[in-house]
Amino acid sequence: MIIMLNPRHVTASAPGKTILFGEHAVVYGKPAIAAAVDRRAYVSIRKREDLRTHVNVEELGVSGFLNLDKGSIEIEKGENNRKGILKYVLRALRKINAEDGLEVTINIDIPIGAGLGSSAAVTVATIQAAAVFNDIKLTRDEISKLAHQVELEVQGAASPIDTTLSTHGGIIYLSRDAEETITLDIDSEIPIVIGYTSKRGNTGKLVESVRLKMETHPQVMIPLFNSMEALTNGAREALTNGDHEMIGEFMNINHGLLDAIGVNTQELSKMVFEARKTGALGSKLTGAGGGGSIIAYCPGKIQEVVNCINEFENAFKVNISREGVRLE
């Protein structure tokens, strides 16, 4: 059966993110610095002639039917470990009281499961596209709040960093105890390379392993997190001043501290140290660890570092996305 689609459609996109400093420490009330990157998720919504809501995530080979009224998902195709993205779409559509009868097409230009905020980008873009499609006006703050609620519902726990950056773009400093999210006014480009491995870490298990260490060895772990707080605050000043050497040095220290709390891997370390050997001033794992991604700070050495990492893993240059969610 051929389903005819109404020509009216809306497309929105939102950027992914990378954590520059402070991952894991942020769970214990310490500050963090993160930036939106120019890799985006695109969500298009059209009206279907029937009353079913269908979602197709092309890059993942995943599709299924959502029942927005009942909150259920009927998988059409896709591997089990890649179906989770439909949960974000379902809850995002329900947040704005969308009605069934939608065709939702998702394209993701962000490596999946690499700690680069792909789920937040999809969630934010879905909320924006669905709101416009249904003639609902939302402020960026409202979009960010709704998207964070979706991530909390799907994941059980979630930092507001990802959804804030996907909504607003730019670079943010999340203050101690997440009391304040401060946009950093940095005009200069930040020359970042992201390297990622096909081995994926389990964020929940990694956070839990660090928590157990914290309970068992607080006298060891607390000083490590205090050091992360100090370097994150130092990095904020270095980024504002454009102090390349200091930014790189703080990244290297941050990686060592993340290694000390047990979230580093051999694959990540190889990328980190090969990047430094090739000319990066600093490099560190980014995100939860256990697999996933690294960032390398590479003034004047971007292409060399990309080429080096691509010889054994995957790498690409990113720019900071000053623009958050937008209509296409």
Image (cartoon, rainbow, N blue to C red):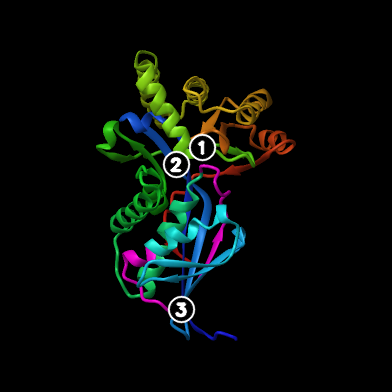
Tell me the tag on residue 77: none
Amino acid type of the residue that numbered disc 1 sits on in the rendered structure: Ile
Q: Quadrant of residue 150?
A: bottom left
In the rendered structure, which segment of residues is drawn in magenta?
92-115
Q: Left of 261 or right of it: where is 299?
A: right
Which residue does the image show at 38% across and 61% down from the upper left? 91
| Closer to us: 230 or 4 | 4
Q: Quadrant of the N terminus?
A: bottom right
CA distance separating discs 1 and 3: 45 Å
Where is residue 97 shown, x and y percent of the image? 31, 70
Query: Mark 1 near mark 3, Cβ–Cβ under 8 Å?
Result: no
Residue 60 seen in the current view: yes
Residue on which disc 2 sits? 35
**Secondary structure type for disc 2:** strand
**Which is more N-terminal, label 1 or label 2?**
2
The kind of residue on which mark 2 rests is Ala
Q: Which residue is mark 1?
A: 190
Circle 3 residues within 10 Å: few <14, some 14–19, many ≥20: some
- Dividing the picture into quadrants, the one containing residue 198 is top right
> Marks 2 and 1, Cα distance to the nearest angstrom?
10 Å
Whichever of labels 1 and 3 marks the residue nearer the N terminus, that label is 3
> Helix, strand or loop at disc 1?
loop
Q: Are marks 2 and 1 in contact (CB under 8 Å)?
A: yes
Q: CA distance from mark 3 to mark 2?
A: 37 Å
